[in-house]
Image (cartoon, coloured by chain):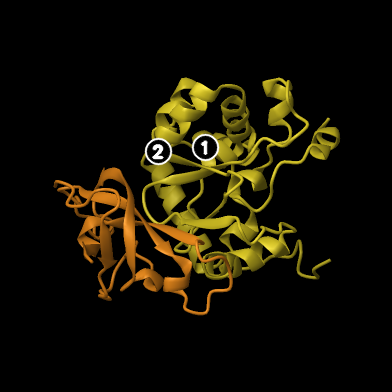
Chain colours: A yellow, B orange
Amino acid sequence: MNEDQGKYQPLSYFQLMEVSLRELLVEKGIVTDEQVRATLEDMRSRGAERGAKVVAHAWTDPAFKSRLLADGTQACRELGLDVPALRLIAVENTPDVHNLIVCTLCSCYPRMLLGLPPDWYKSRPYRSRAVREPRSVLAEFGLAIPEDVQVRVHDSTADMRYLVLPMQPAGTAGWNEERLAQIVTRDCMIGVAVPRVADAANAA
Amino acid sequence: MLPSFKPGDRVVVRSTYPLGHIRTPYYIRGQVGSIERLCGSFPIPEELAQQRSGLPAQPLYRVRFLQREVWPDYAGGADDALEVEIFQHWLEPA
């Protein structure tokens, strides 16, 4: 336990800037305190379930999968995930290609589908190493990619957001969409893990 | 602004180092790759960061590079690739 935890700490430069800006916006009537609170609550409560729904739907509906790969934004709209800020590119894992997502410049991430990014995704070691030595990074996540499988790293540098469409694991034929969605975790959609059937038992 | 490149075209990323808010990573400048797809056109981020309109919108591409060309000591498959979004004004024909 950190000794300083719970003790008063002076605000950092950026914390102070955030408080000043927020108070000004509220004073000027541009947003209300309640709107700020509700937005924070919404952001923090969002997980990866929307992304899992997209993946599970693609697994069960080949025509939807084709549309998702052709135009991710439009395909999400079909599922009622109409998010103006989201320009989505879905990249498909196959027996020959494994995809991995990173944002080397900051922490671009499909938040509307996956929620807030994990801390490691925003860390400098992940951001610098994922493009430089992706196989070592994946191995540290416990994922060994065979030499004959191409590793494709996507650096999310500008206006697009990326979602990995993992391969449907063996032993899940005939599962319905809800059950499939349970094995599609956040990490599978970033590309540092692959769905495993055993995860369904844990999730249940 | 109209797109100058089409999928498959070989391009080189400009090796310039201006100050400001740049969305072209350092490590990819000067590298040769091929256009994977056109993503559409978007306001120029360097201009947006200066409170300007960023218009006319610039075509944005996904460019695919081979890891072994980007990092000469890359330890992985020969086909391993890196895909980066790059605006047209950062690209020249290779």
- Name which quarter of the figure residue A5 lies in: bottom right
Image check: B7 left or right of A35?
left
Image check: A129 left or right of B44?
right
Viewer-proximal residue among B79 and A203: B79
Marks 1 and 2: CB-CB under 8 Å? yes
The chain holding disc 2 is: A
Which quarter of the image is occupied by the N terminus of chain A? bottom right
Q: For mark 2, what is the residue? A: A85
Which circle's residue, 1 or 2, is located before the other in the chain?
2
- Name which quarter of the figure residue A94 lies in: top right
Q: Tell me if residue B77 comes above or below residue A19 in the rendering.
A: below
Element marked by disc 2: loop
Q: Give residue A177's position: percent from left, percent from top.
A: 67, 22
Compute the Cα span from label 1 to label 2.
9 Å
Viewer-proximal residue among A122 and A15: A122
Q: Tell me if residue A128 comes above or below residue A150 in the rendering.
A: below
User: Could you tell me the amino acid type at mark 1?
Assistant: Met
Element marked by disc 1: helix
In this view, which residue lies farthest toward the bottom?
B73
Q: Is residue B89 visible?
A: yes
What's the residue at 74%, 35% (across, down)?
A: A170
Viewer-proximal residue among A79 and A122: A79
The chain holding disc 1 is: A
Q: For mark 1, what is the residue? A: A112
Q: Give residue A31's position: percent from left, percent from top.
A: 42, 37
